Image (cartoon, helix red, strand yellow):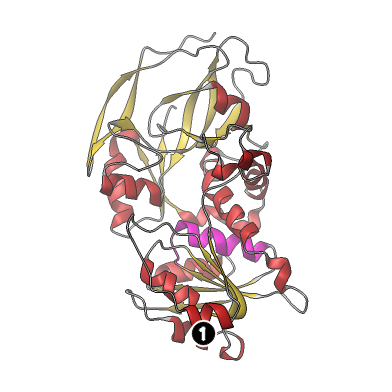
């Protein structure tokens, strides 16, 4: 086993908007475990949520090292690790399914009844438990840099979301028009992934600079909307003949925008409620509209092992232009600054650099 340092720096989330940067012991790998030297981790909207809320009901209980989008190389392996070796460049998904429950058996691993979560990417090293080594660790394709490979997890979520859109239902005549609400990192990844497959994307957001990035990533149309909802009519107006889109995707996690998404699709359309709202959020549903327009309304969550593999492959495609999401790079010591820069809309995503 390679000699590991005894200590490392890491970002500890202690509570609501409380981050402490300090030294931690570098753990040693147990049976079937590996240690990864993190080369790049990226911030995301979930990191903002757990920072502002002091944890996550499923993924993170404070105090804990946090961050979950990561790429690096294997610094040490424990006994009985046969599929990897020291020095391998890898990404690790932030969840690992059991592969035995009814959901796993039917290819819906994101709904696994015993889904394990992994956090701790904003640090120099991370120990990867055995289940994650078996189910969730993947080699990085040759030539893909660490900072782009770290985007595997959010892109995998997006690809799962695209699969849920059932786009083959709407492609008999021509590529369907798809509305994406929200030009944050997830919304922009939806734009890029859909555009590389030839779909016509309308992007709606209040931020002109982010709409411009959306155009660069392939959005056919953009519309600057107001915050607070009530924008469905304006969005429908720029779709083909003002009929609405076949598919609308919410990537905001704002309940008023969920309503806009529902009211922006045409009869027979599909609404993908991808953005997770705060616990306790509710919306009034127009049952007449949902029934007589035969709308499909879906909640969509997380990713699956298949979409992790697909995401790694897609990130090698320069047409995705995923680099446009990475605003700047900061050291671990600036993790709170990075999170606050996202809250203030100064950054889309920040690369947190790990070991040199």
Answer above or below: position of 13 versus 260: above
Q: Is 187 part of what is drawn in magenta?
A: yes
Left or right of 297, for residue 353: left
| Residue 299 visible in the shown view | yes
**Depth check, front residue: 289 or 248:** 289
Q: What predominant SS class does the magenta segment belong to?
A: helix
Q: In the structure shown, which secondary structural element does the residue marked by tag 1 occupy? A: helix
The residue sitting at 42% across, 56% down in the picture is 276
- The residue labelled by disc 1 is 236
- Range covered by the magenta-colored residues: 182-196
Answer above or below: position of 159 versus 80: below
Give x and y (percent) for residue 225.
39, 78
**Total marks in image:** 1
The residue sitting at 40% across, 45% down in the picture is 43
Q: Residue 20 is drawn in which quadrant? A: top left
Give x and y (percent) for residue 114.
51, 34
The residue sitting at 69% across, 63% down in the picture is 197
| Residue 148 visible in the shown view | no
- State the quadrant of the C terminus: top left
The residue sitting at 27% across, 50% down in the picture is 340
């Amino acid at each position: 086993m390679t000699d590991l340092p005894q200590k490392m720096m890491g970002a500890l989330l202690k509570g609501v908007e409380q981050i402490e940067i300090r030294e931690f012991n570098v753990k040693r790998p147990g049976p079937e475990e590996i240690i990864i030297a993190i080369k790049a981790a990226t911030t995301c909207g979930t990191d903002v949520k757990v920072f502002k809320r002091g944890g996550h009901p499923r993924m993170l209980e404070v105090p804990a090292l946090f961050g979950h989008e990561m790429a690096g190389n294997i610094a040490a392996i424990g006994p009985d690790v046969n599929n990897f070796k020291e020095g391998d460049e890898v990404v690790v998904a932030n969840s690992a399914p059991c592969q035995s429950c009814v959901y796993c058996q039917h290819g819906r691993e994101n709904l696994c009844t015993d889904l394990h979560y992994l956090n701790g990417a904003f640090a120099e090293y991370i120990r990867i438990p055995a289940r994650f080594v078996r189910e969730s660790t993947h080699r990085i394709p040759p030539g893909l840099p660490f900072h782009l490979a770290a985007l595997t997890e959010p892109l995998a979520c997006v690809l799962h979301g695209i699969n849920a859109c059932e786009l083959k239902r709407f492609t008999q005549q021509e590529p369907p028009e798809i509305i994406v609400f929200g030009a944050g990192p997830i919304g922009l990844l939806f734009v890029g992934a859909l555009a590389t497959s030839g779909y016509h994307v309308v992007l709606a957001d209040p931020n002109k600079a982010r709409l411009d990035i959306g155009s660069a990533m392939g959005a056919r149309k953009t519309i600057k909307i107001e915050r607070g909802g009530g924008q469905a009519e304006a969005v429908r107006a720029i779709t083909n003949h003002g009929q609405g889109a076949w598919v609308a995707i919410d990537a905001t996690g704002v309940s008023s925008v969920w309503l806009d998404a529902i009211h922006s699709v045409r009869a027979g359309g599909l609404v993908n409620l991808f953005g997770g709202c705060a616990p306790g959020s509710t919306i009034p549903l127009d049952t007449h509209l949902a029934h007589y327009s035969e709308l499909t309304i879906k909640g969509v969550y997380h990713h699956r092992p298949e979409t992790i593999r697909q995401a790694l492959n897609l990130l090698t495609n320069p047409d995705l232009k995923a680099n446009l999401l990475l605003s700047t790079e900061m050291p671990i010591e600036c993790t709170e600054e990075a999170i606050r820069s996202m809250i203030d809309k100064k950054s889309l995503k920040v690369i947190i650099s790990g070991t040199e």
